[in-house]
Image: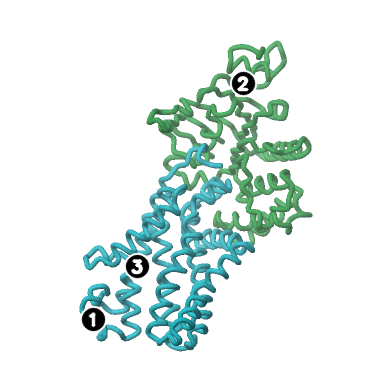
Chain colours: A green, B cyan
Amino acid sequence: MIEADRLVKHFRSGDGGIVRAVDDISFTVTSGEMVGLLGANGVGKTTTMRMLATLLKPTSGTARIAGHDIIREPLAVRRHLGYLSATTGVPDRLTPREVLVSYGRLHGLDEPTINTRVTELLAALGLETCATRPCGRLSTGQRQRVSLGRALVHDPPALVLDEPTSGLDVRGARDLLEHLERLRGDGRAVLISTHRLHEIERRCDRFLIIDAGRLVATGTRDELAGPTGSLEDAFFAAIDGGPPP
Amino acid sequence: MISGRGILAVAGFQWRRLLAPQRLLLAAAGAAFPAAVVLAARRISGSLDRDAAVLLLYALIPEAICMLGLLVTMCPVVADELERGTWQHVVVRPGGRWSLLAGTFLAAVSWTALVGLFSLLLSLAAAGLPASGRLGWIFAALILLSCCGRAALFALPAVIMPKRALVASVVAAIVVEYLAGFLPAVVNQLTVSLRLRSLLVEWMGWRRQLPPELQLLVDDQSAGIQVLAVFSLAITLLTAAGLILSWRQFPPSEEV
């Protein structure tokens, strides 16, 4: 389960002022649920996700991942969380197998566990045929699947995925999202952010819409879309107070 | 939580990056430079006596080549990860920040020491000195100590100001190692250069021949104390860098 409890994050701006990147956000993602985090660029989605992943410390508030507090138990949180970002950051010179093995070691897993897990992941993510090819020679979709494998190598119960379909073509995005649905089906809590509403509107159980660092709407697709039936309209209504011109 | 396996995994990443053809070429050119200088010196002066050759090699390998190698390998410990988008994927692991620092340190020291040793072999051959004798072991030890101490020194600016780590490290090298290191005051006790110079003088048996004014530039304690001082300094600097790195946060806007 992923629980955010009144998360706040302020950054100091270049001119000495304070930027309120995230402003009092609370939500819950239960096990076996996939929740979409929606918002325009720069409204605090990535900052929220990075606080959940213990990459940034909240200015106030807290969050729990699988019951572990991000401030008091960051190591336990990291053991229970899979994190994926839009920038794949996959080393060009390593093969997918080497990447997954290295990150398994970084997690402190033993060699037999790593070997079993890596073989399972390569098969599940459709990377068996390119497992020994350097990542620099893989397609964007394949690299993103390697990145997803890296987030899953320690079999975490909670996943925080920041724009996982960024840069992928339609097929690549669909394959990745189908895999995420299977992970949700395994009982994992999945929080996913994206700009592409159409990709996730039928896949997520609920949505959180944030604007200027604040949570402005939350609910299922049907609850948010209302009579118009359009999640996109609901999104613009939430952030602008009405549909786009 | 920091694990040896995590450190080795990071060191493995870094070694794979260092094995790129451009880096290998750069390392080969750097390693050949001292030998070229020694050959040039022999040609200009007609002959180069043993002590002069040792002094020249000391200035060129444990000081210059090791320093330059570490600037290239240790300084980008954080900046490279931020630029390549791997920072968040490494540090989101338990003990990821410490593993990143210690693994990069291990890779930087082993890589630079190997380049230094290769350079030493070429240079000793160029100077007409035997590589297998005592002189070879003295220089091998000085290279290793130089790499350990200076890599830890460069780790500090690398974590404090990642985007200007190279400039900050050059300043640290000049101010700490070459200004403070040559001051006949207590502050020079905190430098690697004093320890290396003192070890060279001790191991070469030069102490009694040193004129009084040069005695001020070396420490008179035993070789064991000098070695211990370098390792203590390295551990202290690395621990400080690790604590700073544990606390550092980088807003998403600081990544490329």
Disc on res. B192: 3
Q: Mark 2 belongs to which amino acid?
A: Gly
Residue B32, picture quadrant: bottom right
**Which residue is found at the position 49% from the left and 42% from the top?**
A55
Which numbered marker is on residue B211?
Answer: 1
Residue drawn at x 70%, y 57% as measured from the top left = A134
Say what amino acid the circle numbered 3 marks.
Val
Mark 3 lies on a secondary structure that is helix
The correct choice, above or below, for A87 with respect to B156 in the image is: above
* Chain for disc number 2: A
x and y percentages locating residue A142 in the rendered image: 73, 47
**Which residue, given by chain and number where applicable, does mark 2 sit on?**
A219
In this rendering, the answer to whether B194 lies above or below B77 is below
Which SS class for mark 1?
loop
Determine whether, in the image, residue A171 is placed left or right of residue B41.
right
> Pointers 2 and 3 in contact (CB under 8 A)?
no
**Label for residue B98?**
none
Q: Where does the image place residue B100, in percent across and percent down from the top left?
A: 50, 55
x and y, in percent, of residue A117 in the image: 67, 54
Q: Nearer the N terminus, badge 1 or badge 3? A: 3
- Pick the front one: A65 or B231: B231
